[in-house]
Image: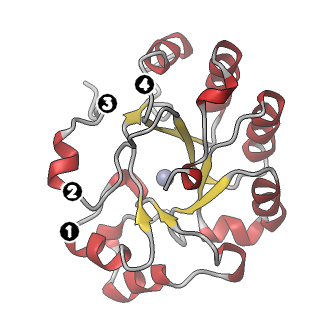
Amino acid sequence: MRSYFIRIPKLADILFPRLTWRLNSSYVFLTFDDGPDPVYTPAILEVLRSYQVQCTFFLITEKCLLYPELVQQIKDEGHTIGFHGHTHQALSDMTQEEINSLLVLPEILKDVQLYRPPYGKISHRQIKLLSNRYSVVMYTFVLGDFDSTIDHTELMSRMKKIKAGDIVLLHENLKSLKLLQDFLSESPKDKFNPLNRIN
Ligand SMILES: [Zn+2]
């Protein structure tokens, strides 16, 4: 059985009011987590460029330090960069010192203002701390590009349920790349925006 919500219930806004789950906007916000990646970042950027669509990438410090040129390319092409941790470790597995270290970014990420916790898990106490430095951004729509039981057709039909104001969670992987290609070919390009143009 599926262990995730596709559309996050509005209750989340009430339980976690300091987190951004959706926006009051006419745009859709595509977000890609877990990069940069030497294979998928260039491929995703190429698709976005060909449709003149901009979105948001939540990046991991250790990968940014390995592929700084990809971070620069994401910036140069007008996308927004968010922070997704120094590593992909869950906040619940980190010491207080490690969590405090999330408030300090390397030079390459210094202007970043958005944070998304790995695995979408964050406590009220952690929200309070990290909100001092970032807007903590979650998502409205979890497509399930990480779910091996879901094929492309099913993902596309889920994608069609996206509405204005939705923040869509994708990852830098092959499934999301294919999905992006097909979805953008069927969508008006002025429907999308990176997150910081609104916030
Ligand atoms: Zn992640």
Distance CA(mark 4)–CA(mark 3) = 10 Å
Distance CA(mark 1)–CA(mark 3) = 22 Å
Taking the image as shown, residue 62 lies to the left or right of residue 86, namely right
Residue at image x 22%, y 48%?
Answer: 13
**SS class, disc 2:** loop
**SS class, disc 4:** loop
Q: Quadrant of residue 117?
A: bottom left
Residue at image x 28%, y 32%?
Answer: 5
Q: Position of residue 111 (x, y in %)?
A: 64, 74
Give the residue type at disc 2.
Phe
- Neighbour tally class for label 1: few under 14, some 14-19, many 20 plus, Cα within 10 Å: few
Is tag 4's residue or tag 3's residue first in the polypeptide sequence?
3
Q: How is the image coloured?
A: secondary structure
| Residue that carries the numbered disc 1 in the rendered image | 124
| Residue that carries the numbered disc 3 in the rendered image | 7
* Mark 1 C-beta closer than 8 Å to ligand 1: no
- Neighbour tally class for label 3: few under 14, some 14-19, many 20 plus, Cα within 10 Å: some
Residues tagged 2 and 1 counted as in contact (Cβ below 8 A) = yes
Residue at image x 31%, y 79%?
Answer: 129
- Neighbour tally class for label 4: few under 14, some 14-19, many 20 plus, Cα within 10 Å: some
Give the residue type at disc 4.
Lys
- Neighbour tally class for label 2: few under 14, some 14-19, many 20 plus, Cα within 10 Å: some
| Residue that carries the numbered disc 4 in the rendered image | 163
In the rendered image, the quadrant that contains the N terminus is: top left
Which numbered disc, 4 or 2, marks the residue closer to the eye?
Answer: 4
Residues tagged 1 and 3 counted as in contact (Cβ below 8 A) = no
* Mark 3 C-beta closer than 8 Å to ligand 1: no
Is tag 2's residue or tag 3's residue first in the polypeptide sequence?
3
